[in-house]
Image (cartoon, rainbow, N blue to C red):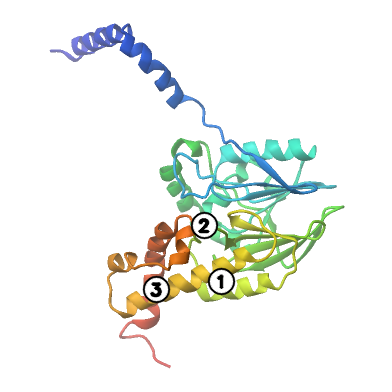
Amino acid sequence: MSMAFDYALTRRRALALMSTTAAAAWIPAFEAVSAPLVYDLKPQKLADGVWMIAGAQEALNQTNGGAIANVVILDATAGAVIVDSGPSRRYGLALSGIARQLTGKNIARVYLTHFHPDHVFGNQAFDPAVIAAPKGVIDGLKVMGNGFADAMYRVAGDWMRGTELVLPSRVVEVGVEDFGNRRIRTFPMRGHTDSDLVLFDESSGLLIAGDLVFLDRAATTPNADIERWRISLATLGGIPHRLLIPGHGPAEPGDRGIQQTRQWLVAIYDIIGNAFERGLAMTEAMAEPLPEWINSIALARYEFERSVGHLYPQFEAKRLPRVDAKVD
């Protein structure tokens, strides 16, 4: 049978099939799958002129399109101030539209709290001149950004269509940025990654902690320095605030997010370290029991297993040095 004949026969059979009741029932499902993907962003008002778009308490996947991180919008005289741009170009465009709608102003600043992909790939929707981050965040994106993009395309799929890496043009250091009726203090820290940014809005008393704080969702550790992270959490605990906005989880008064994140880090570091000392393989360590209190935290087992993969190499580097390494 020739390829041309085979194609013609297949086409006739397909046309005949589409005339059946079964085909008619199948067509709407096809249309639903093919429908344009739209982020359903719902701003939650936290204070006068301040809104948070809550991220899903989930892992990155093709259902949520990578929209798992909290994003903050602040209304200032100078324009809208946004904290983190989201996981994709499509998200950034939706975020830009909502920020302009809520504030009635153009975008004055987009701060990036760190270089992880769920926080930075909405950058394309904004003028690079208004995007700001600590130097370490910018350097991290230069080194890892394209790799993050590749991973996001695989995990989030078509939500990422057209998304490319856009670097910030402004470097953030310790200080205060004045937007007219709103002054924002900037605190570069580290621990969740080697460069994290914390923001404090003097007008509302909001402390925006980025992924140094997780609440009711297990913290991620792919680029973590646990000891440094705990120091940063102690610093955050010393900043008086009216409301704390974590990178993931609900915004709340008080320091429950700080305490829970610290408790999580201590627990997993001890469990994983103990498994390493006992000579357990990584797969065996991943099956170790977790404290009862952790059961209420979203993705606890999932993130614990990932943390085993992240932290075992660190324990190996510290406790199993190369035989030719210099000894002080």
Q: Earlier in the sequence, mark 1 or mark 2?
A: 2
What whole-number distance in Å separates the C-alpha atoms at marks 3 and 1? 17 Å
Disc 1 residue type (three-letter): Trp
**Mark 3 residue element:** helix
**Mark 2 residue element:** loop
Is the Cβ of the residue at disc 3 closer than 8 Å to that at disc 1? no
Q: Position of residue 50 (x, y in %)?
A: 75, 48
Residue sitting farthest toward the left: 1
Indicate left or right for 38 with 20 as reference.
right
Depth check: 88 or 143 in front? 88
Asked which quadrant contains residue 28, the reply is top left
Residue under numbered circle 1: 229
Residue sitting farthest toward the bottom: 328
What whole-number distance in Å separates the C-alpha atoms at marks 1 and 2? 17 Å
Q: Residues within 10 Å of mark 3 (few under 14, many from 20)?
A: some
Q: Position of residue 84 (x, y in %)?
A: 63, 51
Residue under numbered circle 3: 271
Indicate left or right for 91 with 302 as reference.
right
Q: Earlier in the sequence, mark 2 or mark 3?
A: 2
Disc 3 residue type (three-letter): Ile
